[in-house]
Image (cartoon, rainbow, N blue to C red):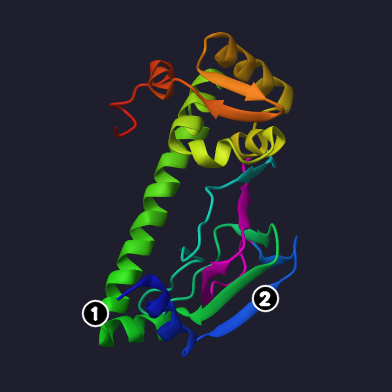
Amino acid sequence: MSLASITALLEQAGTLQHYPPQTLIYMEQEPGEELYILLEGEVRCYRYDVKGNKVTLPFHSVYDLFGELPLDGKLVSYQESCESEMVCKMLRLSSLRLCQLASQDLEIANFLIERLSRRSRMLSQFSCITTASSLSEKAALFIYEHEEHFCSIPIARTASMLNIPPESLSRVLKKFRQQGILSNEHGAYRVLEREALREYFDFAYYGG
């Protein structure tokens, strides 16, 4: 069964919601009563670190599932805030209802496991990026893991995700250009030597 077919089934048990750009969908520490499935558009999830800085979390793609999952009837809080980057079409679904559907339908159960596993991998990878020891290591690992997004979003947003000043990131990217790793034509970056990025981080340590 395709992802589109699965989400069509889930729509019958959930609520479709459209969000205008820059709309807060939920806030960190609010009770996590519903999960969200992104059907169209783009969202930004973020949390605040111990110093009060806003740290953007990994990108969400269409059919990604996010929001916390209450287990055994226990209510947990959202561990992040989420807002729409552009017009978004979302499916809101009770966590309990989703668990019930998964227990009745193997395809939905597999969908839930795959989506949650993907989210866990993304958060683990991003944790490695944000805790890297140097700016070059952070930038190289981010570009290596998220090349498509890096080449399509403003540098200021990349800097925000890495929690570093834009001017510091610009200096690192200039170094990468001088080394022939990146090119920049009319403001658009392109990765020329992908494997050269690995020289800046311990690929084995990061699970490569």
Task: Tell me where the magenta segment starts and ends, as one range.
Answer: 28-50
Toward the viewer: 179 or 47? 179
Q: Quadrant of the C terminus?
A: top left
Q: Residue at x 40, y 21 (%)?
A: 201
Residue depicted at 32% across the width and 63% down the height: 114
Q: Earlier in the sequence, mark 1 or mark 2?
A: 2
Please tell me the numbered disc located at residue 58.
none
Give the class, few, some or many, for how many residues have Cα within 10 Å of label 1's Cα (few <14, many ≥20).
few
The residue singled out by tag 1 in the image is 106
Query: Which x, y percent locates residue 32?
Result: 54, 72
Q: Is residue 142 above or below residue 47?
A: above
- Which residue occupies 66% across, 63% down? 27
| Mark 1: amino acid | Leu
Point 48% across, 67% down: residue: 68
Is residue 96 inside the magenta stretch?
no
Q: Does residue 64 lie above or below 172 as drawn?
A: below
Where disc 1 sits, the SS reads helix
Q: Which residue is mark 2?
A: 18
